[in-house]
């Protein structure tokens, strides 16, 4: 993940904390939840386009 996107995520979580002080989310927790969701969908066969989306995101990271 690019540093600027990580920083944006941290700012978003800090803004959320002003509204919901005890939300307890971190970037690591958000990624963990997204990964768990991906694995769950993949196991259920509901992954149409997911791999392509990941490859597209990775390709954007390289550029």
Image (tube, rainbow, N blue to C red):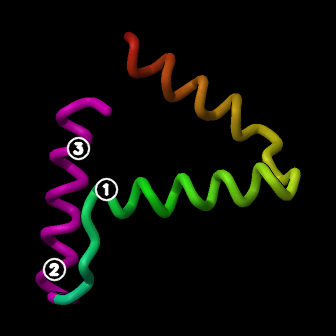
Please state if 6 lies on the left or on the right of 61 as rendered.
left
Residue 39, relative to residue 51: is it above or below? below
Between 60 and 46, the one nearer to me in the picture:
46
Sequence-first disc among 2 and 1: 2
Instruction: Compare marks 2 and 3 and give the one earlier in the sequence.
Output: 3
- Which residue is most to the top? 63
Labelled pair 2, 1 in contact (Cβ < 8 Å): no
Q: Residue at x 28, y 72 (%)?
A: 25
Q: Nearer the viewer, residue 53 or 44?
A: 44
Asked whether, in this view, residue 48 is left or right of residue 1, the answer is: right
Q: Mark 2: few, some, or many residues within 10 Å (few <14, many ≥20)?
A: some
Q: Which residue is mark 1?
A: 28
Element on which disc 2 rests: helix
For residue 59, above or below residue 9: above
Read off the residue under disc 3.
6
Which of marks 1 and 3 precedes in the sequence? Answer: 3
Instruction: State the image coordinates of residue 10 (x, y, percent, origin top left).
Output: 17, 56
The magenta segment: 1-21
Q: Quadrant of the N terminus?
A: top left
Q: Quarter holding the C terminus?
A: top left
Per the model, the C-alpha gap separating discs 2 and 1 is 16 Å
Q: Which residue is mark 2?
A: 17
Classify mark 1: helix, strand or loop. Answer: helix
**Residue at left offset 49%, top offset 23%:** 58
The x, y position of residue 27, in whole percent, is 28, 56
Q: Which mark is residue 53?
A: none
Q: Does the magenta-highlighted stretch encompass residue 3? A: yes
- Residue positioned 82% across, 42% down in the render: 48
> Looking at this view, is 31 or 3 the one in front?
31
Q: Residues within 10 Å of mark 1 (few under 14, many from 20)?
A: few
């Amino acid at each position: 993940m690019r540093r600027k996107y990580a920083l944006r995520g941290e700012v978003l979580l800090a803004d959320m904390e002003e509204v919901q002080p005890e939300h307890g989310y971190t970037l690591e927790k958000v990624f963990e939840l997204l990964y768990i969701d991906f694995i769950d969908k993949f196991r259920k066969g509901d992954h149409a386009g997911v791999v392509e989306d990941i490859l597209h995101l990775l390709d954007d990271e390289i550029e």
